[in-house]
Image: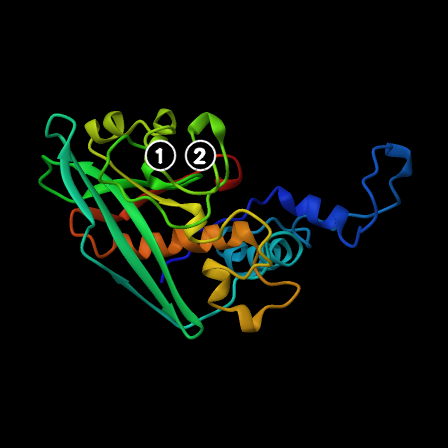
Amino acid sequence: MHCVNKWIGLLVILCIATKGVTQSVNYEEEQVPPYALPGLWNSDRQPDSAAWLSEYRPPLLDLLAGEMFGHIPNMDMSISIGSPKCDEVILDDKVRMQEYPVSVRASEGVLLFHILIFSPVESNKPSPVFLGLNFVGNHTIFPNAQIGLTPNWIPERKKEKLIGHTATDASRGTMARRWPVEAIVARGYAVATVYCGEFDPDFDDGFSNAAHALTAAQRTESSWGTIAAWAWGLSRALDALEDISHIDASRVAVLGHSRLG
C-alpha cells in the first residue's frame, strides 16, 4: 500500500506552542504564558538525510498526528477496481475520460469511491498523472453527462448550484475553472481526481461515516480526523492507479487547494 506524505513541518511549532491549551482564544501578546521550544534537531549536529528519515522525522510526524490530524490506524485491507462506468473519447478525440469504481475492504466494512481520469489518447507509453481530491463531486470538474453523480453528502454552494447536500445535473462542470483538463492532457499528462466526501464527508458526523467507519470500533481521542482520512484516501487512489495500464503510477504529482492541500 502507498502512503502519501501529508504533514507540513512548519506546523510543529504550532503543535508545541498550543499543546494543552483548552481555553478561549487569546489575542494579547503579553498574556501568552512562558514556554520553551525544544531545539530543532535535539542535538548540536544537523542530521544528514539518513538520520533525518530514521531518527528525526518520525517523532515530528507522531507529534503532528497526536496534536492535529489524528493517528491513521493500521488496518488489513484489500483494494479492487471495477470496470469504468464511463469511457469516452472527448475534446476533439484527444482526451480519454474514464471513471472507475474502487472498493476498499477492511475488517469492519467496505468503502466505495470513484476515481475520474482524463488521459491522452495518442500516447505510446503510460502517462504521468496529476492526482488531487475535489471539493464537491467529480461531476463538477468537467461538464459531461456521463460522469457519475456521487450519492454521498456534499456541501451546499449556491454559486455552483449545489443545494440540499445532493449532487444534481445542474451542477455539472461548475468547478471546471479549477481543473484545466485540456491544457494538462495536451502536455502529455493525465489528471485523476476523487470527491473528498467519498473518503469523509466534511461535516460533524462523529467520525462515523466513510473511511472512519472502517475502524469505528477502534476509535480513541487521538484517532484520525477528516484531513487524515482525505490523505489516506489519496493513498488508496494511488493504489488504484497502479492497476490502470495507461497510467504511470511511478510518476504521480499530488496536488490540492486549501484544506485539500
Identify the residue at horizontal 46%, vertical 48% (top origin). Answer: 153
* Residue 200 image offset from top left, x and y in percent: 48, 53
Observer-nearest of 128 and 145:
145
Observer-nearest of 66 and 59:
66
**Depicted 38 relative to depicted 122: above or below:** below
**Depicted 58 relative to depicted 105: above or below:** above
Q: Quadrant of residue 254?
A: top left
Q: Quadrant of residue 177?
A: top left
Residue reaching furthest to the front: 164
The reply, left or right, for residue 46 in relation to residue 153 is: right
Q: Total of numbered circles in the picture?
A: 2
Colour scheme in use: rainbow
Task: Verify CB contact (< 8 Å) between mark 1 and mark 2.
Answer: yes
Observer-nearest of 212 and 160:
160
* Residue 135 image offset from top left, x and y in percent: 44, 39
Label 1 secondary element: helix
Q: CA distance from mark 1 to mark 2?
A: 10 Å
On residue 140, which mark appears?
1
The reply, left or right, for residue 245 in relation to residue 258 is: left
Please name which of the two marks, 1 or 2, marks the residue nearer to the observer.
Answer: 2
Q: Quadrant of residue 55?
A: bottom right
Residue position marked by numbered label 2 in the rendering: 162
Crowd around label 1: few <14 · some 14–19 · many ≥20 (10 Å): many
Crowd around label 2: few <14 · some 14–19 · many ≥20 (10 Å): many
Identify the residue at horizontal 39%, vertical 45% (top origin). Answer: 195
For the N terminus, which image quadrant? bottom left
